[in-house]
Image (cartoon, rainbow, N blue to C red):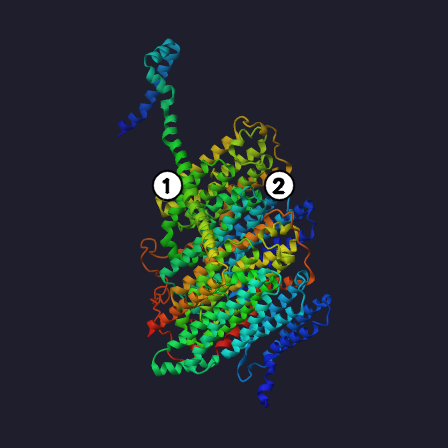
Amino acid sequence: MATASHWLSFIVFLPLLGVPALLCLRDEDHVWIRRVALVVSLVEFVISLFLLPGFRMGQPDYQFVEYANWIGNAIHYHIGIDGLSLFLVLLTTFLTPLAILCSWTSIHENVKGFFIAILVIETAMIGVFVSLDLFLFFLFWELTLIPMYFMIGIWGHDRRIYAAVKFILYTMFGSILMLVAILWLYNLSNAHGTGTFDLPTLQAQLQHGIISLPPTTELLLFCAFFLAFAIKVPLFPFHTWLPDAHTEAPTAGSVILAGVMLKLGTYGIMRFCLPLFPYAAHRLAHIIGVLALIGIIYGALVATIQPNFKRLVAYTSVSHLGFVILGIFSFTTISFQGAIFQMISHGVSTGGLFLGLGMIYDRRHTYEIKEFGGLVNPMPIIMAFYLFIALSSLALPPLNGFIGEFLILIGVFQYHHVWAAFASSGAVLSAIYLLWSYQRVALGEVTVEKNRSLTDASGRERVILVTIALAILFMGIASPLFTRRMEATTDNLVRQTQIEGARQDAKAPPPTRIAPPAPTGFGAAHSAGNRLTPAAPAQARLVNATTAAQVNP
Amino acid sequence: MMDLVHALTGMPVIIALLGLLIAWWFYIKSPETPKKLAQSVRGLYTLVLHKYYIDELYNTVIVQPLLWISTNVLWRVIDEGAIDGTVNGIGRGMRESGAHMRQIQSGNARSYATWVVIGAVGVTVLMLGIWEMVR
Amino acid sequence: MHFSAEQVSNLHRLAPEIILCLFGIVIMLLDPFLGRARQRALGWVAFIGTLAAAASLRLMYLDQGYAYNELIRADLFSIFGHAVVIGAAALCVLGAINYLDDENLQRGEFYALVLFATAGMGILAGANELLTAFVGLEMSSISSYILAGFRKRATKSNESSLKYFILGSFATAFFLYGIAMVYGVTGTTRIDQVQPALDQIISATGQVPALSILGLALIFVGLGFKVVAAPFHIYGPDVYEGAPTPVTALLASGPKAATFALMLRIFYVAFPGEVHFWFWAIWGSAILTMFVGNLAAIVQSNVKRMLAYSSIAHAGYILVAFAAATVYGVSAVLFYLAAYTFMKVGAFLVVTHLGQQDERHLEITDYAGLGTRQPALAVCFSLFLFSLLGLPATGGFLGKFFAFQAALDSHAAFGPAIVWLVIIAAINSVIGAYYYLRIIIAMYFWEPSKDYTPSKVPLAVGTALAIAAIGTLYLGILPRDVLHAAFAAATSLIAR
């Protein structure tokens, strides 16, 4: 893990470097603020594309790794990408310029703050995807919350404060329990050798039995991590922050939220929950799978009857990401690939849906479906592209949504036939809500007089729509370009999560681990009457549970 | 075996030819027959005209109930009522406990001193209680 | 009058206290000579005094050991405690200079009292003997009582001072009573000789003497009062709210840090073998303190009072680290105190500046739209609020991080109880997030209020805020050196 060039660090921090440039501009200079932000994000996208040629296929290890000591021996600045995070980083850098472009005319107050928030959140999100140190990961994870909180709360719509507070407290609750689990893992690694927060090291220690994890502890740690990610995904029933946050956020906020931030959750599950706690993952797979299925169907049904168009699209994320969770917890390489692909394609498609919605909102300042009707007459270009994006969200071949869902369904079917059957109905349901809403909004005659005079897409909006459409088409047709780079990682992940006999007998002890010692933690009965130590020198009186250094050398 | 195959494959052909025949009879040979038939078997005619009411059937049995369940049960009862209700309820509970905490702060210095004494008694009882258990 | 050579040569180990007291005396002497207009120069003199005291820590560092017949112990732990306390005092002095001008209260006594209080706190940090600790405690307390009532014409300030004095003396009585009991059982008041004396009794009689446990309980009451821990916290909100805000800044940071240092000495050095007695008291107090502080703060609309409750909550988090009963726990407490000082003093100084004359503008509505009107100040305040909340990349987060880590590390000895403590602390962090975010909502999401326009930030306050902000970020991003220092201090406390 020697330090190579600093390309990846540059990608992570470049948007943050754009912030001083923005700070130097005057507050009223909206034109240049937007331009500078756009240029920074475009440059970011271009340099991130250079990750592609440098990425070696067939190698499951992390690439572009950078490693530096930070706090003591335990916390390092350790970043790297593999097949899982490569495309998530590209998704982030792809969507950010589009988010900036779509906010060109709709943000009028505190413009500087808005674009600074977008750049900061871009850095934080990319940081989450490339962090290989648990502390660094947590740092970037929490850092994504604040700019989004501001974006929703300042530039959002009517119920923005409620939505922003709900969003941040909900997600923070999950992540703080994850922090406790991270610390617990660190203490475990401390007890059995040198303590570290480094993910690959911890993974190796767990797999080789250097750290022995009793099944109950593993289950609890898995749940702590999983809760934080499940809230983020969102998994039913932890999804209720999503409709409010998405609906009340400004368009760019929704695009970033739905396009990238939800994937932080699914990424976390694949990066942490599965490799670190495979036994627990298998044991809970059924419950989680059922929740994912409920999410797919429930999300789709509730989406169908929403009177607010944006809220409708928000609920579709619950449904689509239910597919991803289902794919993850089927533990087959093809469903993993489908899950990763679906993450990317959902980001592009749903991001596109929100971009289209934003264009409608810019003209009419409402999202209520009954205010629309026959919009294809005044705005054919926007509605045509919207239909195209909706069809990709609906999983129409040969667009990108189809690839993801299809791969997932094949993988799920190998694992659990019944699930696949129910999940397929989700695809049908997605047709219902997307097509029905499109019909009510776009087709037929213009029902509300105001809509007759709406302008069609401007040049900037056409650029946005065409870009998304091309991306959708490209992903759908050239999907092997994506899956080939994911293959090594997914194969590796399957191997890491494979435990013999774990699928058949959930009660069997994990055979790849050394038999855990008698539990002194959760299992030990603690009576207040115990004398902790016999008479001994003062130093040994106090509990020195570990002799190894803490975060100090 | 081949008879079955012939029967099965032959049947649609025969039905198609029959249909050809009927169509020729109804529309070319004797055009007044369809009208007479429609008047004599009114019910059957209406049934067939409305495509066996399958669309209406689907609507009442599947679509409307599904929409009703989605709106009233899934959305209002579960999503907004149960889940959001819990979330908002926690928030409300916190705020109410906070209001209670606030009332303990009476501003009265003597009551404050009483609280210190209560706290002191509590700590003392706790620690001496442990001592009692260890003895 | 025979000073043994040993006694005199150890004065360098008391250098900070000596310098602080000297500067205090000089300020009091200069006070009548300088006219009303030039009194603020005394503030800067006081600030230089704190800097000099901080520099003199080097003398302590170079030659550690005992002073005054082993009444004072100048070890790394004492140096760390001194550094925190002197830092708090320096920032508060800076913050007070303009405030006192606005309130027309500019007197040299203010700065002298702050310096005397700081000297007392320094003694608390370095005390090796219980009655010396009492002297330090009273030095800092009595100065604090007077400082709390410095706004003579405001009823709130008088109320604060009187309540603080009455209840503080009441609690100190508990403390003294506890010392008396410990002396009665062990025959010594020296902190480092209590445990050996207890050991002898234990080996003779086979059990821990009840009187020593009672003494420890009463000492906990007295000191728990000082750090505003539940169930002795009840005076805190009223006293903090009534005192002049720079004084509140000092009260919230300095005496807390010094008293925690003393508590660490007493619990970890004088009673380490009785850990299974006091663990539960600390455990229960921590849970109560966190909930009381956080829940009551939710409903506050007065920012100063909200920050007062938040101080109570943070004492709870420090108690979580305290409960770890290991050297890592000590290290975590010390790091937390350093980070906490920066963020709390910084937050209170912002409140000082925005409170304006007569402390009229302390409601959350007065902070509306600060993000647009004074962006630098709003960013600064947001940084302190995020640090109090525990957002990563700030000192507050790392303080909680190390506290939780140290506590979880001890779970082998204390079982699930301490794990639940950490989980409760984590949940409390989220509860706490709500009211910190509310201030940020007011600053950024609300329209600026029409009837209040804050003034520009003057130099002294601005310097203090800058120092606090830089400190918060430094501790959050590059904590290595301070963490090493805290760990070294912890080792010097426990290892002999």
Q: Position of residue A36 (x, y in %)?
A: 67, 48
Judge from the rendering whether residue A306 lies leftward or rightward of residue A382; answer left or right: left
- The residue where tag 2 is placed is A106
Q: In this view, does A15 lie above or below A472?
A: below
For residue C63, which numbered disc appears in the image?
none
- Three-letter amino acid code at disc 1? Ala
Q: Mark 1 points at which residue?
A: A421
Q: Is A241 rendered above or below residue A531?
A: above
Q: Nearer the viewer, residue C78 or C236?
A: C236
- N-terminal label among 2 and 1: 2
Dot 1 falls on a residue whose secondary structure is: helix
Examine the rendered structure and indicate whether residue C115 appears above or below residue C429: below
Mark 2: secondary structure: loop
Q: In which quarter of the image is residue C391?
A: bottom right
Closer to the camera in the image, A209 or A527: A527
Viewer-nearest residue: A249 or A276: A249
Q: How crowded is mark 2: few (under 14 residues within 10 Å), some or many (20 or more)?
A: some
- The chain carrying label 2 is A
Q: Residue at x 48, y 76 (%)?
A: C494
| Residue C392 shows in this picture | no
Amino acid type, label 2? Ser
In front: mark 2 or mark 1? 2
Find residue A463 and report its horizontal and vertical position in percent. 61, 39
Is residue C354 in sight in this rendering?
A: yes
